[in-house]
Image (tube, coloured by chain):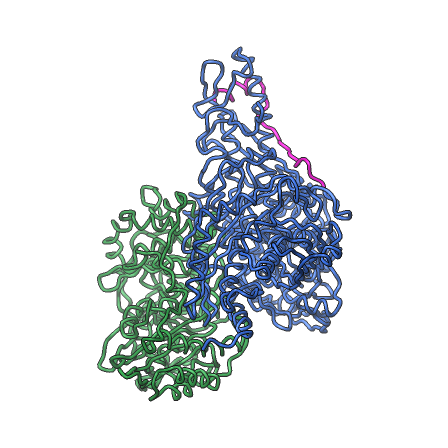
Amino acid sequence: MADANIAATAAPVPGGASQSLRHESAAMHVQGTASYIDDLPEPRGTLHLVPGLSARAHARIASMNLDAVQQAEGVVAVYTAADIPGENQISPVGKGDEPLLARDIVSFYGQPMFVVAATTRGAARRAARLAVVEYEDLPAIVDIAQARENGSPLVWRPMEMKRGDVLAGLEHAPRRLSGRITVGGQEHFYLEGQVALARPGEEGEMHVTSSTQHPTETQHMVAHVLDRPANLVTVEVRRMGGGFGGKETQANACACLAALVADRTGRAAKMRLDRDDDMTMTGKRHDFVIDYDAGFTDEGRIVAVDMVLAARCGWSADLSGPVIDRALFHADNAYFYPDVRLRSEPLRTNTQSNTAYRGFGGPQGIVAAERVIEEIAFATGLDPLEVRQRNVYGTHDRNVTPYNMVVEDSITHDLLPALARRCHYAQRRAACREFNATSPYLRRGIAITPVKFGISFTATHYNQAGALVHVYTDGSVQVNHGGTEMGQGLHTKMVQVAMREFGLGPDQVRITATTTGKVPNTSATAASSGADLNGMAVLDAVRRIKRRLVEFAASHWNVSEDEVRFAPDGVHVGHKVIAFSHLTRQAYFARVSMSANGFYKTPKISWNGDTGQGRPFYYFAYGAACSEVVIDLLTGETRIDRVDILHDAGQSLNPALDIGQIEGGFVQGAGWLTCEELVWDEAGRLRTHAPSTYKIPACSDRPRVFNVDLLENAPNREHTIFRSKAVGEPPFVHGVSVLQAISDALASLDGYRTCPLLDAPATPEMILRTAQRLRRDRPPAR
Amino acid sequence: MAVPAVCLEGGEAVRGHRNKGTGLTGIRRYIRFYVGNAYHELATIAPTRTLLDWLREERGLTGTKEGCNEGDCGACTVLVVRLEGERLVWRAVNACIQFVSMLDGAQVLTIEDMRAPDGSLHPVQQAMVDHHGSQCGFCTPGFVMSMVAGRKAAGLGQDERGIDDMLAGNLCRCTGYAPIVRAMRHAMQAGPDHFDAMADDMAARLRTLRDGTTVDMAGPTGRLTIPATVDALAHTLLENPDSRIVAGATDVGLWVTKGLRDLPHVIAIGQIADLRRIEVTPQGLFLGAAVTWQEARAALAEILPQPDEEVFRRIGSVQVRNAGTVCGNIANGSPIGDGPPVLIAAGATVHLRRGDTRRTLALEDFFIDYGKQDRAPGEFVEGITIPVPAPDTVIRGWKVSKRFDQDISAILGAFSLTLAPDGTISNPRIAFGGMAATPRRALRTEEALAGQKWNDATLEAARAAIMADFTPLTDMRASAWYRSTVAANLLTRLYADCGPQAARVPTSVHAACTATGDHAHG
């Protein structure tokens, strides 16, 4: 009874929580029968929508002639901002800076100005191109450097996070260095693009099926745009074809435009963006320029760190405020900074409004932290792993973050050497150096990096969740909760929670689509929190029902309540075992309610952004990765030869799915830092707006040897769902080891004397440029 | 007097089909093919209607997904099965840039057809479930189709590199590919699938669709001609100089899906037997205009041997190479096509035909300027000939791009030269893509090499010469600096790869690693 939360209810339930189970939709996925929104049968008369996008980065709309659009074949309606009955506003943070359709001013190349509704999607696409728009150009600010030069306004209050006296710390530090790192952005490239289907109902009702990570917010946006109460709007999503943060707020535009057309025409309306429109319109991961100033000792111990983190936020705030804040929250990664000051610059630019993306700014902060470590390693001549080990958070001292939270659960000091031993880091590092000594064109590099990732929404009120569980008289169970499924396996884990508690198999527990009609007032499925929050809410609902069933069974069969147990072979009632369905049928006749909603709010957390005080995170998730790469000095091409990852998922809810999150997160993180490059031209036009020009990792880019292990016997010290840890975002950070390994390979060019200062993404061109810079200090070898 | 076309568009699935005559004209006014086991005759379909849109919008077969609509992500992968000779040939293609009009005589299999008749999962599907190969599931049907095709393709997929090749055209954003590769390794070991048992029936059915006639049909949205012979093609083109030849549609497809262009008259040449010839002639290897990259790959690798088939295996992906043709890569005149530089370096000639008039010119002379080729209205590329290289000829081609597989080259350098035993270079032919408005020879560089001993000084001279040969552009793929630097560095790579013995060292990251695998899990 010491820990009811971790003890199994009875005998282990096969496939129940804490055990591997295939994805609940796996069989449907492989047969093509898992339905995404565009696969659903279309209601009679469904209209197809295409947005008309601006062709200027910043301009006044002098005139917009849509006659030809109107008259094009198949077009039923064309709407502009003037046709919106409610607010022309979809800022997710209430800032009022994000019109759904541009009215007078366009603020980035690709901003929606109007929407075409036609009988076919092809007709709508053709018609949208017939608009005649005259622009009066305004000065456009495209990147961070231009924004700084021109004193571009900030989209959000800048944050300053500090502890101690950083200036004094730097001044008195035995050694000191400063530098800058540029970190690129990233397109989500969810395979299923943005899509929504709106169906009008009675008396202003609107049902929207949306590929959204945040149905409640989508519901609110639709309600505001249509000027009606939330109880008329239902938003539903069964599954997304990938999200990664790109559908946390970016789904709202499609949903609102579809609802607008459905409302105005009385017909169902579907908007599914073409990939090029999607990439041109929607926000991405923020790119950063980070300046750092660090003081340290000859032994490589950090004394003080001062950083300024500037981000390209795009034309509106969107989630940039909390994203940039989280970059600050992670600019320490796993390291203790005795004196520290971290400052943010969320810069407004005339580009897509950058948004949530797996890690939510955290990875960018961590990249900077690892650069500081690397610089200190070169300055002191120490192995970067040694510098890391000397600076990781302690458990009893050296354990306070820049935001004054005490790190209670640090394990990095054990994790790093454990991984190093497992993967023979020291021998392989020596082998890389030996290889490099005689290899003129190919160079090898190796690096280990840790991750410490804070788990909880930093907006404390988001840390709540609801669930609704029904048990039917035949003993079948339906689980609903507020989280959304985007491939991460959340629904599977929620089914497993109910399976474990009721002793049922996967066929007896059914997950349903997420809908605001069943569980209201939910949070985005984001911040890795889906299983933590909703799992506890499902558990709460399940246990409410169980309590009623136990009470009933005890009185009905005349046993004590602790003689009633739910097990895989049935419900144990005293000495007999009865089928779950028998219990539920009897309970029904006895008029026992077998439906319950559950609720959860994360304990212990609080955060005051103004004072920089509190405990924003319930706990931290940890891990470490070792990457070995080979680079080609003639072309800058890279290959990842081997990766070893040791990751802390607590007492994993589903080891198979968690390993999938780690493998996938790693490759996505490595892609971010290597081949994925966003390029805008001087006019602010995104030139990489399709997979032909924007390259996410392909199959052959995966590590040749790829060893992923979960940390064993590592239950979460906090009371999370069955002592698991969140696993969505933290493994993304393991990709940082690839950047560091490439840097290690490059450092061989001048005998490991200089930090290569490799910026990201480390495309072939970036690697070749860095190599050239490193060589410049030395006479050419030939 | 045409036969009234029977159109089953939107209609019910029909078992078997009416093998009716084609009328006195010998011209068929409809196309016919199978989707799964359902037979279709279409008489009015738009010639540029894509297979993906048709499957999803008209057939309700929504298992096939649209990820990018430009042939880069593979979510729409389907199988096109044809009877060629007496052999069933299975090809994975991207349905988004495959026109329905190209499918005459074929059987299309989609994800909906992969389960066995008894309802059990295909071994590939089962392996994907067992190895947790799907997460969001959106790319999964496309992967399954590529994997099923991979099992059918001889010589593919036996090792890790084969699996990489097989899956290079399918993007997954969730899994990091590791569990998919595990599933594929497992599925390669599985026994025959239900299609193997059906092969004879499939062949018999497809055999009945062979009638050797020209198809010419017109609907409200355009005209489609499928000439039965190359002579018919020549005449049709002469009479309709504004028509558009489509072989594999890997380029033209994008004009339609992204450019929203109308093509009022499409001439589909992909199945013209005369143009599908791969022949060794006294002049060299002849490839007809309808020979795909995949079909040409083995013959090209034999005549132009490079380590690892470096360039040919990296053109597009399986799906793109199964549709795109060698000659289409030439005829479209792209400055960044991967074929032309290699073929120019190899001294290929292109055969053009207009009506009954034929001419042959050096491939490099075909490319005049950006978007401009030496091709008259009504004239078409009938084929190319690649001469057999002299003994001791060194052939190398290197593609450099942000991503190894399925990327468009930032730069592609191709080299052909002969090395005498004393190290003297003769007959250097060097061509580059991505360095100019057209694929072009590096004439100054060739001059710097010709007749010289292959040594450090010659290399330096060649590196200097190549800077004078090209003035490349900066774009989203690479800067002018990068292109120039890498162009020179590829000469260094050539030197290190096949220069004097003393200079030889490994130069490619892609050849540098052999170990593969993992110790995980499932």
Q: Is residue A400 found inside the magenta-colored segment of the image?
A: no
Q: How many marks?
A: 0
> Which residue appears at 44% of the width and 82% of the height?
B463
Q: Position of residue A700 (x, y in %)?
A: 42, 59
Relative side of A398 to A772, left or right: right
Q: Is residue A745 visible?
A: yes
Chain A rendering hue: blue
Quarter of the image with the C terminus of chain A is bottom left
Relative height, residue A551 to residue B383 (above, below): above
Q: Position of residue A555 (x, y in %)?
A: 56, 13
Q: Is residue B54 visible?
A: no
Front residue (pair A370, A41): A370
Q: Position of residue B344 (x, y in %)?
A: 36, 81
Which chain is assigned green?
B
Q: Position of residue A741 (x, y in %)?
A: 50, 59
> Which residue appears at 42% of the width and 62% of the height?
A434
Quarter of the image with the N terminus of chain A is top right
- Where residue B433 sits, quadrant-wise, is bottom left
Specify start and end residues of the magenta stretch as a single range: A581-606
The residue furthest right is A611
Front residue (pair B309, A484): B309
Front residue (pair A24, A705): A705
Front residue (pair A496, A123): A496
Relative height, residue A458 to residue B169 (above, below): above
Relative side of A123 to B252, left or right: right
